[in-house]
Image (cartoon, coloured by chain):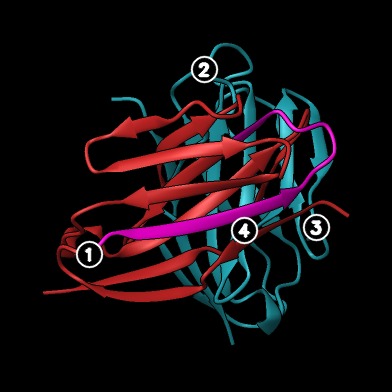
Amino acid sequence: EDKVVQSPLSLVVHEGDTVTLNCSYEVTNFRSLLWYKQEKKAPTFLFMLTSSGIEKKSGRLSSILDKKELFSILNITATQTGDSAIYLCAVSDNNDMRFGAGTRLTVKP
Amino acid sequence: EAQVTQNPRYLITVTGKKLTVTCSQNMNHEYMSWYRQDPGLGLRQIYYSMNVEVTDKGDVPEGYKVSRKEKRNFPLILESPSPNQTSLYFCASSSRTGARNIQYFGAGTRLSVL
């Protein structure tokens, strides 16, 4: 059965800390892995990863995919209170998309 | 502005009273999908549609219906809502070409079934 597992489920850090969020998956016919950030409303897109070892970067956020070991990490450096959110990992196959349960990140001042 | 619009945003209803949550997108996307989000379970797919008149079950389709008569609209129908359908619902759409896996989400519909 296809599945996407995120860890940790919850994380509390202080401003300035660096965090690493994990996503492992078992999906038949893998096409891509996506990271979303969800604050109070709808998830918003962060990264899409399709190839192993190629880091995607946007400001303080970066992500990389390992298709051999079937996982991805999302790094956030120098965290700010505005980074507090649920971070969702999703994996798509040929037809649809499967989401993990999310990691709730809380950044304290 | 490119967007996915859901209505209503909030809904309180009683068991058994049929309801419809509308979803419309203005990006000419072929693919549309409905999810429910529950604490600790993440987003679970209810139904998806690859194009007009083509719909398929996701992971949790029981108790829901959908239709895709037009490309832009993908309503979610609860014929006889039950309390276990109390949840936060998201509609999403994506293109079948280019960056086709990037789904754009509506703002969500919070449903309470009493």
Depth check: A19 or B49 in front? A19
Separation of residues labelled 3 and 4 (CA atoms): 18 Å
Residue B20 within the segment the image draws in magenta: no
Crowding around mark 1 (Cα neighbors within 10 Å: few <14, some 14 to 19, many 20+) is few
Q: Which mark's residue is nearer the viewer, 3 or 1?
A: 1
Q: Which mark's residue is nearer the viewer, 4 or 1?
A: 1
Separation of residues labelled 3 and 2 (CA atoms): 25 Å
Q: Which mark is residue A17?
A: 1
**In the rendered image of this protein, does residue B101 appear above or below residue A91?**
above
The residue at which mark 2 appears reads as B28
Asked whether the residues under marks 4 and 1 belong to the same chain, the reply is: yes
Q: Which mark is residue A88?
A: none
Q: Which residues are magenta?
A: A18-33
Is residue B55 at least partly visible in the picture? yes
Indicate the amino acid at tag 2.
Answer: Asn
The residue at which mark 4 appears reads as A100
- The kind of secondary structure element at disc 2 is loop
Q: Which mark's residue is nearer the viewer, 3 or 4?
A: 4
Earlier in the chain: of badge 4 and badge 1, it is 1
The residue at which mark 3 appears reads as B61
| Image side of residue B73 versus residue A75, left or right | right
